């Protein structure tokens, strides 16, 4: 996607997002969007384009750091519940409770018992949110190994991106296969009809951003919707299917 086309399409979609937010506010809706994916998959950039022109009072971006000692001693979901959307709000999680199935699993930050307890409780927890009126969308941004290597190198070279560098980055490539295995198990066990996973092929940042916004437009109803903005490219974003793990649709 060339820059001119991207900017034109992004502007049109951001206008739609403003219309959507007006509807969320006027109808006391609660929207929760979860972004997961490998390090450097493009979560920050996608979230930035979604929220760029929205009201900061009703838009919340949550990117939690390392849990405190008290949080580690509390119910696992407790640190997240404080950040759930209230009526009239859209909340975007830049990583979420699925840390337990990803980073914590790979890096050994949680035990097998804690992991299995999470896997057994995450869907009942999400279904409870849906029953309480929260509309929940889950996106997994997938990139290839060469693309991740290039993006992590760019972080190290670019002084404006050094804030993104973390100790986890240093082993992201080394533990590529472990992250793949953790991702595959997470998607298999937590994809469901009520809170499904949507996989985004994100080697092209521009196409990923455009199609995530299009997907949001397609799945959240509001009046005066421009229907031309509701058709995400199925080659870029689609509901998870286990066949994707062997077909090449998801990076091995």
Image: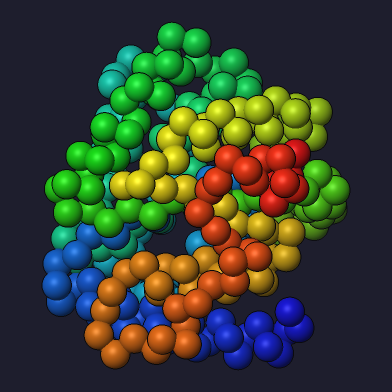
Q: How many marks?
A: 0
Residue beneath the point at 54% across and 18% down: 109
With 172 as the anchor, is 117 left or right in this view? Answer: left
Front residue (pair 62, 244): 244
Residue beneath the point at 39% across and 89% down: 226
Q: Position of residue 213 (x, y in %)?
A: 49, 71
With 231 as the anchor, is 33 left or right in this view? Answer: left
Front residue (pair 82, 241): 241
Residue beneath the point at 32% across and 34% down: 123
Q: Inspect this view and state whether residue 99 appears.
A: no
Which quarter of the figure has residue 56? bottom left
Front residue (pair 83, 210): 210
Q: Quadrant of the N terminus?
A: bottom right
User: Is 71 located above or below residue 126 in the figure?
Assistant: above
Q: Position of residue 33 (x, y in %)?
A: 39, 55
User: Is 201 located above or below residue 242 in the figure?
Assistant: below
Q: Quadrant of the C terminus?
A: top right
Front residue (pair 78, 140): 140
Q: Position of residue 185 (x, y in %)?
A: 56, 29
Residue beneath the point at 23% across and 71% down: 24
């Amino acid at each position: 996607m060339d820059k001119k086309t991207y900017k034109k399409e992004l502007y049109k979609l951001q206008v739609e997002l403003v219309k959507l937010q007006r509807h969320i506010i006027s109808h006391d809706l609660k929207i929760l969007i979860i972004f997961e994916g490998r390090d450097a998959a493009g979560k920050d950039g996608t979230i930035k384009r979604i929220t760029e022109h929205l009201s900061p009072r009703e838009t919340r971006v949550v990117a939690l750091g390392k849990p405190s000692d008290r949080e580690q001693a509390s119910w696992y979901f407790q640190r997240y519940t404080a950040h759930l959307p209230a009526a009239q709000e859209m909340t975007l999680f830049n990583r979420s409770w699925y840390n337990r199935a990803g980073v914590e699993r790979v890096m050994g930050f949680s035990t097998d018992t804690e992991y299995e307890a999470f896997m057994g409780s995450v869907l009942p927890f999400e279904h409870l949110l849906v029953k309480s009126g929260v509309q929940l969308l889950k996106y997994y941004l997938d990139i290839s190994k060469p693309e991740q290597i290039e993006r992590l190198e760019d972080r190290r070279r670019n002084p404006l991106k050094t804030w993104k560098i973390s100790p986890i980055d240093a082993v992201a490539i080394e533990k590529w296969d472990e992250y793949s295995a953790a991702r595959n198990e997470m998607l298999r066990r937590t994809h469901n009809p009520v809170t499904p996973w949507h996989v985004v092929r994100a080697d092209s940042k521009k196409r990923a951003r455009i199609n995530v916004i299009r997907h949001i437009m397609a799945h959240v109803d509001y009046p005066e919707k421009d229907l031309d903005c509701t058709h995400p490219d199925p080659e870029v974003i689609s509901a998870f299917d286990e066949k994707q793990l062997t077909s090449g649709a998801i990076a091995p």
